[in-house]
Image (cartoon, rainbow, N blue to C red):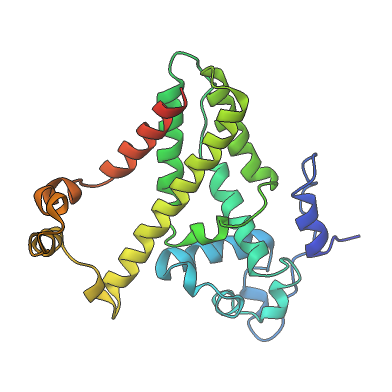
Amino acid sequence: MARSPHQRRNARHQQLPAPAEKTPAAVRRGPSGGTKKPITVDAIVEAAFQLIAEEGYDALTMRRLAGALETGPASLYAHVVNKDDLGELLIGRLCTRVELPEPDPATWRDQLAGACARLRDEYLRYPGITRATLAVAPTNLETLRLSEGLLAILLAGGVAPQTAAWALDALTLYVNAYCLELSLRDARRAGPDDAWVVSRDELRSRFAALPDGFPQTKRYAAELTAGDGHDRFDFTVDLMIKGVG
């Protein structure tokens, strides 16, 4: 008997891996029904990834996704519970793409920093997708595989269990927030709110024009606005890792 979307979602939070997906694909109807790809969880996930990559996470709705798959929203609800359930699936799939090394006590700091960078790069492929990570119980088996590996690296470095647990939470939260901020910046830059995104030179100019009550900000405007690419990300992750051991 085919499992309902709720049953499949619950299975992703069990201690044992869920059995292989056996839900039959939705039957296509109409003149072009025989030429369209069947509706499956994988098809839904891949279409969602494509939509987010092109337009951002805010553009993802069940109606838009159904349109991309040339079907109706009801067909999607036969496979996923709602958008939150879909977001959980998407984050889980991204986590499976992050390769983790065997924990090494001699290089654990580099291993941890590298894993954070790989997770960052996966998230940045899909603007705004880290919205789906916020306020979510971390018990999805696919996301747990990643946190399990990161925790193992911290413990291999001799970090105390409680410190390692909270460090893991802080690091992943920072990665999520960093990626979300970049996606918001890029969305504003590309949209009607582009005036809110200022250049480095403009920001320095604004700092220089501040009243004398802000002497440090005026003096160190260059330092406050420094950094290219992921310099600030690398600095912060390194700072956090050094702080735990």
Q: Nearer the viewer, residue 110 or 93?
A: 110
- Please indicate whether residue 217 sits to the left or right of residue 67 in the image: left
* Image position of 101 with respect to 84: above or below: above
* Image point (41%, 32%), residue name: 113
Quarter holding residue 39: bottom right
Q: Residue furthest top?
A: 106
Position of the N terminus by quadrant: bottom right
Q: Nearer the viewer, residue 96 or 183?
A: 183
* Image point (54%, 21%), residue name: 159
- Please indicate whether residue 220 sits to the left or right of residue 238 in the image: left
Quarter holding residue 160: top right
Residue 173 coordinates in the image, percent (x, y)? 50, 47
Q: Residue furthest right?
A: 1
Q: Residue furthest bottom?
A: 31
Q: Nearer the viewer, residue 71 or 237?
A: 237
Residue 150 coordinates in the image, percent (x, y)? 55, 32
Residue 34 coordinates in the image, percent (x, y)? 67, 75
- Residue 124 seen: no
* Image position of 179 with respect to 29: above or below: above
Q: Nearer the viewer, residue 121 or 242?
A: 242
* Image position of 179 with respect to 110: above or below: below
- Residue 179 seen: yes
* Image point (33%, 43%), residue name: 233
- Please indicate whether residue 240 sits to the left or right of residue 104 in the image: left
Residue 41 coordinates in the image, percent (x, y)? 68, 61
Q: Residue furthest front?
A: 213
